[in-house]
Structure formats: C-alpha cells, structure tokens
C-alpha cells in the first residue's frame, strides 16, 4: 500500500539541494577539465603552431610550459585568495581571465601574443582551480564528499589524456587555433550557469582578512623557478647551468619563504599543515601520480609521432584507452576507499603503474606500449583519488582553498618532474633523426623503477585509515 503521508519541509528541501549540489559539481568539474586539458592539449598541435607563427625551435616548448609555470607558481596565492575573498567569487574571476586569454591565444599572430595569452591562461587557472575545489569541499560532506572527490580525481588524470586526444582531433579537423578558442563559448556558458547553482558564501570578517604579500611573491617565484628548471631538463640535461641555477634558486627562495612564514602574523601557508601526515601523503601521491601519467604521455606521444609517423589525429585516438583507464581507476578507487584503507589503495595503484611501465619497457611497440600505459593509468587513477581524499577529506571551509591549492601545486610540479625525468632517461632518442622502438625502452624502464620507489615510500607514508562513510 502506498503511503500518502506528506513529506516534511526538511525532506522536501533536501532533495532539490542535493540535485543542485550535483549540478554545481558538474559545472565546476567542466571548468576544471578545461584547465587540465590545456596542460597537454597543445602537445600535438605544436608543429602546426610553430609553422603558422614562424616560431624558433627554442620558443616552441614555451607554448606548453609557460602555462604550467604560471599555473603552478600562482596556485597557493589563488588558494589563499579563495579563502579570503570567497571561493565562488574567485572561481568566476579566474574563469573570466582564463576565457578571455584563451581568445587572445586563438587570435595571436606572433610568438609574443601567444606566450602572453598562455601566461594569462595560467594566471586564470591558478585563481580558479583551488577556488572551484574549495566550493566542492563546502558543498559535500561524508560519503558524498568522497564521491565528489572521485569525480575530481578522474578529471585530474583523464584530462591529461583527453588533452592529447582533443588536441589531435581539433588540429586535424579545424586547425590549431581551435585548440584555444573552443574554451571561449564553454567558458562564457559556465560564467552564466555557475552563479545560478553555486551559492555565494560570506568570506571571513575583517579580523580574518589579510594577505601575506611577501610570502605570495616568494612562493610564486620559488615554484615558478622549480618548474622552469625541471622543464629545461628535457632540452639541456640535469648538469646544464640553465637547469641547476633555477633549481638551486628555487631551493633558496623556498627556504626564505619558510623562514618568513614563521614570523608573519597571518602566513600564506601555515607550515604545520605540511607536517600533517595525511596532507604530506596526499601531496606526495599527487606528485608521483601526475609525474608518471604526464611523463608517460610525453614519451609515448613523441615515440608515436617521430618513430612511427603517426599523425596528430592518430596519436589522439590511440590514447583513448589510456583516458578511459584513468577514469575507471579513479572511480574504482572511490568505491574501494569506502571498504579498505588508503595505504592499500595507494600501494596497489602504484604497483599497477610499475607493472604497466614494465610492459611498455619490455615491449615498446605501439600496441603493447599503449596497453602497458593503460594498465599504468588504471593504477594512477586510483592513486589520484587517494591523493585527493588523503589531503582534503577532513578539510574545513576556512582552509579548503589553501589545501586545494597545495595539492594542485604538487600536480603541476609532478607533471614537470615526470617529463624531466623520462625525457632525460630517453636522452639522445629525442634528437635522433631515425628512431626505433628500443630507443624508448630504457625511459619506460626508468618509469617502472620510479613507480616502484613511489610504492615503497607510500607504504611507509600513507596512513592506514578508511574514509568515513557519513558526515
């Protein structure tokens, strides 16, 4: 017999709120996906961009890397601004900057305009990404927060693969300018839709305001110098002055930043946050997972294009199984984290990554290589969701933006480090006129060793805790 008892006002209110939360997550996730895509979307479009704009060989890598340098370097500042000024406000401001600068990139007629546009894209991404994740953290609690972080984790990993795919499709079908201008209509639609479903929340009162400007300058300069040095490794090696000087400078600047943060009244980053085991574990897992994923894409796309003559479109389509595997790994990790502890999930994910890289090293032909990277991506996807859950699972609204920025900073550092390590392992293979499969086997073997080393560290560092099922 069907009950006719009327629902209470609370029951009637909860369902629309639940629906609006998931709608908000869908919109914020779409915005975040644009930012992640733009890390790798220009990978396969670089030859066409260089030809159209008459870029020098030394200028080409900066079309990719200047975005990462600004994105990673300004992330902590963006997270702090989200906590001070309001996460929704900073989400919209960052999205507006990113959308406008995407149009500038698409319309650019020379190297200076394109690099300026890419720099502004990085600025917009640094403002938006931690703020959008902070909004998600305030909208969801308990088991729903875990599911929301699973969606976010899938984007962090799959976005890198989808960027290669989308870049190949757009470059082949519509031209390289659409790699950038496709962001414009999507960004405008999101700017209209997000305020309709994401509630505005008040920021801190006057007593809670205050921005550590010297700290922001130092951490931005240090992180930017580190990313610059890591990016430089691929072309010049670890021993080059252009690598060692920025990396050494980054260490000195970070040391100065740490000393400053102990003295200021309202520090940009409370150093005690990094001493929390869960935050340190999540940051390390993000560094390792992103390095393995982005480094693998760089190495494999280079091998397919230069050793096997694949077109941009063909490279993009070949990476589709890797993207699917990353999403499947993240969603599977989300379900498993509710039943087993985070340490087991992290170790199992990194074991799959090591095994996948080992397959690519043993059989570096295109089919086997992509199969190996798909296995690795399955484990990396699970590692991503473990990293987000460990770092952010217990974050309160007052520090959600800063924690989000911290984990996203390690995402950018990891991508740069992964490319640096694997490109230096490939060595002469990246500049040889005639390439064979065996030229990349050693680099994939190095990736397998890195994954195994990360596994050992994760076994000791990641706490053996389970995600709480309810908030």
Image: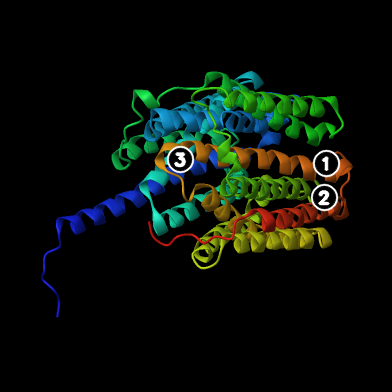
Q: Secondary structure at mark 3?
A: helix
SS at mark 1? helix
Given this view, does label 1 or label 3 mark the residue nearer the observer?
Answer: 3
The disc at residue 424 is 1
| Mark with earlier residue (2, 3) | 3
Q: Which residue is mark 2?
A: 443
The quadrant of the picture occupied by the N terminus is bottom left
Q: Residues within 10 Å of mark 1 (few under 14, many from 20)?
A: some
Query: What residue appears at the point 74 percent right and 34 percent down from the top-left corner?
Result: 230
Question: Residue 308: horizontal and vertical position, in percent?
Answer: 79, 51
Density class for disc 2 (Cα within 10 Å; few <14, some 14-19, many ≥20) is many
Identify the secondary structure beneath mark 2. Answer: helix
Using the rendered view, name the quadrant where residue 83 is placed.
top left
Residue receiving disc 3: 400
Q: Which of the two discs, 1 and 3, labels the residue nearer the N terminus?
A: 3
Q: Quadrant of the C terminus?
A: bottom left
Q: Are marks 2 and 1 in contact (CB under 8 Å)?
A: no
- In which quadrant of the rendered view does residue 330 lie? bottom right
Direction from residue 393 to residue 59 in the image, left or right? right
Residue at x 44%, y 39% (from the top left corner): 132
Mark toward the start of the polypeptide (2 vs 1): 1
* Residue 121 seen in the current view: no
């Amino acid at each position: 017999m069907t009950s006719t008892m009327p629902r209470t006002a609370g029951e009637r209110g909860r369902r629309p709120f639940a629906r609006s939360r998931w709608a908000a997550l869908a919109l914020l996730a779409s915005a975040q996906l644009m930012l992640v895509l733009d890390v790798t979307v220009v990978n396969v479009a670089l030859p066409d961009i260089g030809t159209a704009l008459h870029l020098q060989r030394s200028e080409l890598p900066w079309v990719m890397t200047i975005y990462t340098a600004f994105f990673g370097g300004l992330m902590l500042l963006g997270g702090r601004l989200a906590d001070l000024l309001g996460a929704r406000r900073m989400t919209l401001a960052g999205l507006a900057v990113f959308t406008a600068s995407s149009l500038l990139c698409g319309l650019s007629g020379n190297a200076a305009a394109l690099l300026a546009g890419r720099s502004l894209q990085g600025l917009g991404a640094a403002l938006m990404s931690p703020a959008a994740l902070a909004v998600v953290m305030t909208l969801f609690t308990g088991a729903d927060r875990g599911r929301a972080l699973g969606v976010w984790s899938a984007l962090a990993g799959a976005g890198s693969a989808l960027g290669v795919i989308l870049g190949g499709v757009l470059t082949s079908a519509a031209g390289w300018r659409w790699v950038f201008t496709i962001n414009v209509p999507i960004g405008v639609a999101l700017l209209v839709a997000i305020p309709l479903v994401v509630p505005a929340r008040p920021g801190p009162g006057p007593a809670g305001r205050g921005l550590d400007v010297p700290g922001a300058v130092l951490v931005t300069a240090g992180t930017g110098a580190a990313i610059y040095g890591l990016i430089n490794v691929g072309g010049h090696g670890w021993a080059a002055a252009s690598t060692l000087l920025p990396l050494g400078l980054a260490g000195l600047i970070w040391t100065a930043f740490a000393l400053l943060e102990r003295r200021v009244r309202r520090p940009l980053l409370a150093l005690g946050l990094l001493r929390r085991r869960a935050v340190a574990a999540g940051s390390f897992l993000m560094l390792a997972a992103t390095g393995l994923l982005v480094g693998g894409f760089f190495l494999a796309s280079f091998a397919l294009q230069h050793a096997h003559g694949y077109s941009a479109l063909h490279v993009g389509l070949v990476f589709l199984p890797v993207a699917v595997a990353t999403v499947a790994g993240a969603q599977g990790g989300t379900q498993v984290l509710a039943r087993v502890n985070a340490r087991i999930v992290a170790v199992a994910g990194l074991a799959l990554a090591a095994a996948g890289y080992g397959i690519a090293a043993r059989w570096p032909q295109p089919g086997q290589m992509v199969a190996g990277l798909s296995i690795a991506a399955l484990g990396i996807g699970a590692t991503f969701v473990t990293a987000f859950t460990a770092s952010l699972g217990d974050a309160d609204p007052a520090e959600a933006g800063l924690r989000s920025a911290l984990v996203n900073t390690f995402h950018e550092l990891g991508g740069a480090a992964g490319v640096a390590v694997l490109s230096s392992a490939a060595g002469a293979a990246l500049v040889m006129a005639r390439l064979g499969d065996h030229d990349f086997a050693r680099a994939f073997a190095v990736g397998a060793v890195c994954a195994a080393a990360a596994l050992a560290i994760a076994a000791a560092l990641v706490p053996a805790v389970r995600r709480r099922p309810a908030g």
